[in-house]
Amino acid sequence: TCNFDEYMELFKYKNYHGCFICDFVDQGLKSGDNSYNYGGDFGDYPNDLDFCANGLLMSDRKITAKFEEAKYFYQDIKFVLNENVLKIINDNKFKSTEGYYFKLMIFDNGKLVDEQLFELNIAPKESYDLNLSSLKIQSGSEILLRISYHAKYDYSFANKEHEFGFDEFLLNSSLKNGAHAKGKSMGRNLEIIDDKYVVGVKGDGFNYIFNGRDNNYGGLSSIKINGEEFLKKQISLTM
């Protein structure tokens, strides 16, 4: 899906009619060992390699990050945060939000601390300003706001409570205020970490470390912002 956000932004032009995602699901063939194969896996030549294995869903219908990204940009209700006001925009041309309910969740350092359900009947192409000034934010915490909208009823295509869309916003975090976020260290005062076991880079208020240089199991193992570690363990593929 590449720069899908920039593509969807073009729909603001009235004469733009867009395109479509041609591969909804991977078309790999299941083999005896329960793996899914594509061009070249059968000793076939010439072939198109993974040309038919780049869909939004995997061959066994498991969801991918591409699916989640497409869902996010296709959602017809948008959210914009400006200081203490969350603007909820109904981007539908003919349908109100009467058939949905909204869920507002607050996370403090990753822990759910508040959850509120509410309903709004926003007319098509209209918006509603939700005041967030009553939220109590601890200065030393990372506060994440998650807003989503769900089916109020059962539909032929979705069950009641199904999540149609969401957005997330950092209300308070060292990630928002660090030098890295302001671009102060880009190309300046950078220190390269280079030894037998790890490689990385340090700058004003941040450092990134990749380990495993001496084996085949390397990866991003540390992200520190203003002295705070943001990874519990090394990032690795799970597929």
Image (tube, rainbow, N blue to C red):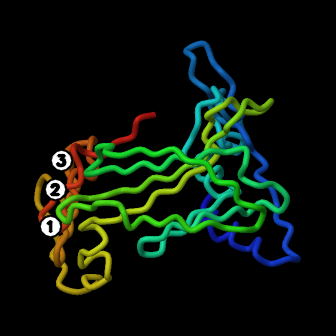
As shown in the figure, which amino acid type bears the numbered disc 2? Val
Residue for badge 2: 198
Quadrant hosting residue 100:
top right
**In terms of sequence position, does the residue under pointer 2 or pointer 3 come before the other?**
2
Which residue is at 28% across, 67% downward? 175
Nearer the observer, 211 or 206: 206
As shown in the figure, which amino acid type bears the numbered disc 3? Asp
Which residue is at 47% across, 75% downward? 82
Residue for badge 1: 193
Nearer the observer, 176 or 80: 80
Q: Tell me residue 70's x, y (percent).
A: 65, 52
Left or right: 32 in relation to 91: left
Left or right: 227 in relation to 167: left
Element type at mark 3: loop
Residue for badge 3: 214
As shown in the figure, which amino acid type bears the numbered disc 1? Ile
In the displayed structure, would residue 238 be above or below residue 214?
Answer: above
**In terms of sequence position, does the residue under pointer 1 or pointer 2 come before the other?**
1
